[in-house]
Image (cartoon, helix red, strand yellow):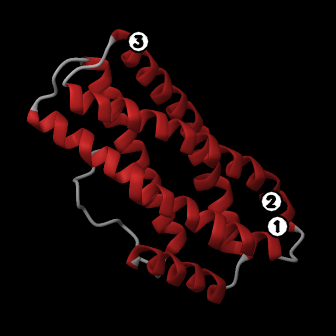
Amino acid sequence: MLIKIGAQPDHGFDEPLGLLSDCHRRIEHFLAVLAAIAQRSAGPLSPPERAQVESALSYFATAAPRHTADEEQSLFPRLRASQDPAARAALDTVARLEHDHAVADSRHKAVDVLVRRWLSDGRLSDEDRGRLKEHLAALKTMYDEHIGIEDRELFPAAASLLSQEQISAIGREMKRRRRT
């Protein structure tokens, strides 16, 4: 999916579950950008490649942690508090999703170090390129499953289990996170 840098998401804070899904498209996009550029070269980046890499690093350093906070601080606690028996099925996956967030954070930090070294030095050693490609492949594998569970199972469950007021509160909290 082609995503124009700076493009508006399909959903707003009044539709926070859709907005979380929109964030998934950006995660997929920026991860694919990094993987494609790492696959092509370990040498100096062209100005357009450099701009794409810097945009991806910026996204993963700022927007992705907010997305994780949106889920872990706003969505997951409300699902845990639900008394609906159907919530139990959704909650079975929440601990795994939180674990995935921690793994992704660690791998993104490693990717950031390697790519910033690439930007600074103008090239990557064969060893660093191999490590970068390994981290990116592991992230893709993890995100393919993680995002699929959230988009196909967790978000639809949240839409049916949470009240409109709870969903609106999630949107307000998401908006507030982006103002700080």
Q: Which mark is residue 91?
A: 2
Of callouts 2 and 3, the N-terminal one: 2
> Residue 105, position in %: x, y?
55, 45
Q: Of helix, strand and loop, which one carries label 2?
A: helix
Horizontally, residue 1 falls left or right of residue 155, namely: left
Q: Which mark is residue 65?
A: none
**Which residue is outermost to the top?**
126
* Residue of label 3: 127
Disc 1 or 3, which lies upstream in sequence? 1
Left or right of 112? Residue 45 is left
Residue at 41% x, 74% y is 178
Along the viewing direction, whichever of 129 and 76 lies nearer the viewer: 129
Which numbered disc covers residue 87?
1
- The answer for how far apart the CA atoms under marks 2 and 3 are is 40 Å
From mark 1 to mark 2, how far is it between C-alphas?
A: 6 Å
Res 113 quadrant in image: top left
Residue 115 appears in which quarter of the rendering?
top left
- Name the residue at 90% across, 69% down: 85
Q: Nearer the viewer, residue 64 or 158?
A: 64
Horizontally, is 115 left or right of 176 in the view? left
User: Answer yes or no: do the residues labelled 1 and 2 have beta carbons within 8 Å?
Assistant: yes
Disc nearest the viewer among 1 and 3: 3
Amino acid type of the residue that numbered disc 3 sits on in the rendered structure: Glu
Q: Position of residue 35 (x, y in %)?
A: 36, 28
Q: Residues within 10 Å of mark 1 (few under 14, many from 20)?
A: many
Determine the secondary structure under disc 1: helix
Q: Is residue 57 above or below residue 131?
A: below
What residue do we see at 38% from left, 29% from top? 114
Question: Residue flagged by tag 1: what amino acid is it?
Answer: Ala
Residue at (27%, 27%) from the top-left corner? Answer: 118
The percent coordinates of residue 122 (x first, y second) are 19, 25
Query: Does residue 68 sit above or below 146 in this rendering?
Result: below
